[in-house]
Amino acid sequence: MIDVFIKRINRGEGKELILFSKKKLNYKVFEGLPPVSGNQTHLRFHPTRSEWVGYSTTRQNRTFLPNTMECPLCPMTNDKELSDIPVDQYEVAIFTNRFSSLQLHDSKIPSLELETNQATGTCDVVSYSSNHQDQFSNLPQERIELIIHALSNRTHELLENPNIKYILPFENKGKEIGVTLDHPHGQIYSFGHIPEIIKRQSIAQQGKPLENYLSKIPEELILKKNSTGICFVPRWARYPFEIWIVPYRRVPDIYSLSDDEKKDLAELMHDASKRLDGVFDTPMPYTLAWQLSPRGYEDSHHFHLCFQPIRRSKTKLKYLAGVEQITGFFLVDLPPERSACILRGEEQPDE
Ligand SMILES: [Zn+2]
């Protein structure tokens, strides 16, 4: 188990910077990037999908693939190169996104002929490292453990706000998936409502708990296991090389894991991310979801992690096209059983 030191810095207008480290650091604090003002957000109700769509006025202006000198996640060395993490050094940092699509204060909502609402919530950025060149897959296991502690701490704190109904920590990895910053980072979206798909997933687990499946996973689909959980390719994978990590013990969120379990989870994540980059010997673009319980489903929800990669061969990406986008019905070219063989190093992938 690691020690975790926490330093909080108020960045004005209700925005916070929280720094997490394994050893005590003495930070030199700079002024940093100023807050973005005038961001107006709201929700509109989609009449046929029966779900909310979010609108935000400043997201189009957000930073897009800056060079290292202008990276808002790199630490600061002087007063000129401004950063969102305005300190001279750090290990893991979480801060409120200046271009947040969800906001804890009320916005002006346009008067429309359909149902609208406040886009209640908040968006955080999670920087995994002060080194711009790092990637999740080459971080030492101890750093992944620190990231888990940081997410545990922050998500638990966010849930203390009764207006937050659901929290999604996630990572978009790779330009292929639309990442706008190279610096290794994830995000946390805290919602004032429970998105429909998330509600459906939690309701499904009330009827059929995930534990039912865990005991039946055959050896050939398992990538790694330890005393806390199991890392495997699910039989129901919708993406090529999809990987799930599930603790054996049903807990609703990261915070409910013991320190030893967090350490074991880091071991499984470290292994999974290395296997993904190993498939084509190049960084694998993916989305990673930390599936926490929405508010009200804590008694049945089983916390787990899903890596959803989008590279299906050395030269081809899986795009969500007509059928997937319109119906949510996935068509899969690569059987999960073969994905598992390739991820286990027993077979070579297609060129
Ligand atoms: Zn950077």
Image: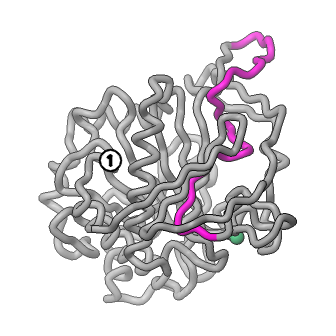
Residue at point 58% right, 62% down? 127
Position in image of residue 145 (x %, y %):
37, 66
Q: Between residue 129 and residue 234, name the one nearer to us.
A: 129
Position in image of residue 256 (x %, y %):
27, 46
Residue at point 78% right, 43% down? 35
Eyeballing the image, is 49 above or below 304? Answer: above
Mark 1 residue element: helix
Residue at point 44% right, 74% down? 273
Residue sticking out furthest to the left: 215
Residue that mark 1 sits on: 255
Residue at point 36% right, 77% down? 271
Place residue 245 in its image quadrant. bottom left
Give, as a single range, the part of the protein colored magenta: 89-114
Say whether residue 100 is magenta. Answer: yes
Q: Is residue 203 left or right of residue 193?
A: left
Q: Is residue 88 visible?
A: yes
Prevailing secondary structure of the magenta residues: loop
Eyeballing the image, is 286 above or below 150? Answer: below
Amino acid, disc 1: Tyr
